[in-house]
Image: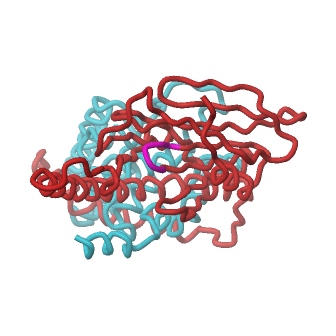
Amino acid sequence: MVNERNLDNLLKSVMPEVNKQLVDDLENAIDYDYKFSWKFKQKMKKLSHYEERKDISKKERMRTTIIRILAEAAACIFALFILGSAFGVDIFAFSKFFTAKVFETKEGGLVHEYHSITEAPDLEDIVYEEPSYIPEGYKEYQRDIFFSGMDIIYQNKYGDEIKWNQYLATDGLTMGIDNEFDKYEKIPYEETNMELYIYEEKQNITLYCEKGHYIYLITASSCGREELIEMLKSRKIVDK
Amino acid sequence: MIMYLMSIDSQENKSKFEFIYDQYKYLMIRVARDILKNDDEAEDAVHDAFMKIANNMEKIGEVDSIKTKNFVILTTKHTAIDIYRKKLLIHNNEMSVDGLENPDILVSEDVVHMNEENRTIYIINQMPDIYKEIFILKYVNEYTNLEIAEILNISEATIRKRISRGKDIIAKTLNEMEVQ
């Protein structure tokens, strides 16, 4: 008679064979000449990019944590050093201003969460900046200045928009970037990097940059890479 | 510390996900086409299955292993079945239980003379797929009932019932063979 324990052992010993037969039957009938459609390949490319970004953001998180620890340690040592000697030295000039932790949301967004390493400027001391270069055909359509940043929308006669966002990276500020992009590029810029996200299907392009105490984000639907880079480089202080 | 940062940068760039895609896409489309008989729908099923796989990456160990192959096959199969059901406007998420209660196991003279292991293989091969799949995930992949429930998108209670019912069928048929 077969009892429960015998049956468990029996199943453990025979199931690999049953499994092998089933898999062999399937594998013997695989059509390796099958041509996947262009639509399928595109969808898979997107999914693959998404997964790749997940890996990168994990590494990035590890890296930002390490950098933050090193920067904090360096700031402490430096602070101890200057306490006994040169009062009035501007510590901001010797350390990073903030770190950005990057993590994924379930909806597929890439969220940057900022943490100040040094004290951010007082909100009344914010320096607002706007691009002095605007791509041909675009005019300012809307401008919102708020306590921690500024948004400007430029529009052309076809209704295409360029959005300019500048934010002060205050402690706890979060910013989301759609990470279903098709191309990603890191462009060295002065002592930092610009990050370019290209969304082919949505025909959208986003330029992201962390510089000084500020985050810059430029999004456009009908502009090229060079125009967005030029806009960022051309920024000037807004007259109050 | 600098060395550590360098080692992060020099890691293999190709993700586990890409390895799975390269290794199993033809097997997956074969499984999906078998059920859906339509290339477009089969590709949708493979894509959706890859999304499920991506969300369960922690359940996957070595890419080139029978356990991963089982996981990929069964995820694709059940995703394709879900699409097939939607196509037929059947909203019940559970498999139909018709024929599951008492599957007919034909016992021939040859089978009676087999050893116990071969008899068991013979019986399992005649049982509906839903029992075989659960037994594979339990005894080959060594997943818990809860993990199997998540993979097959059915309740844990149903998994428990099917394991118990499947074992009863095997035990009963083996005991009948003993008597003969």
In the picture, measured across the screen, residue A223 lies left or right of residue B54, that is right
Tell me the colour chain B is drawn in.
Answer: cyan
Q: Position of residue A225 (x, y in %)?
A: 71, 57
Camera-side residue of A23 and B63: B63
- How would you classify the magenta stretch by its main secondary structure? strand
Question: What chain is colored red?
Answer: A
Instruction: Provide the residue span drawn in magenta.
Output: A211-215
Image height check: is A129 above or below B111?
Answer: above
Q: Nearer the viewer, residue A158 or B34?
A: A158
Tell me how the rendering is colored. Answer: by chain
Figure quadrant of the N terminus of chain B: bottom left
Residue A88 in view, yes or no: yes
Q: Nearer the viewer, residue B4 or A9?
A: B4
Residue A52's x, y, as percent? Answer: 48, 59
Please say whether residue A232 is one of the residues in the magenta stretch.
Answer: no
Is B165 above or below relative to B132? Answer: above
Residue placed at 55% from the left, 55% from the top? Answer: A195
Residue positioned 44% across, 65% down in the render:
B15
* Residue drawn at 59 percent across, 26 percent down: B90
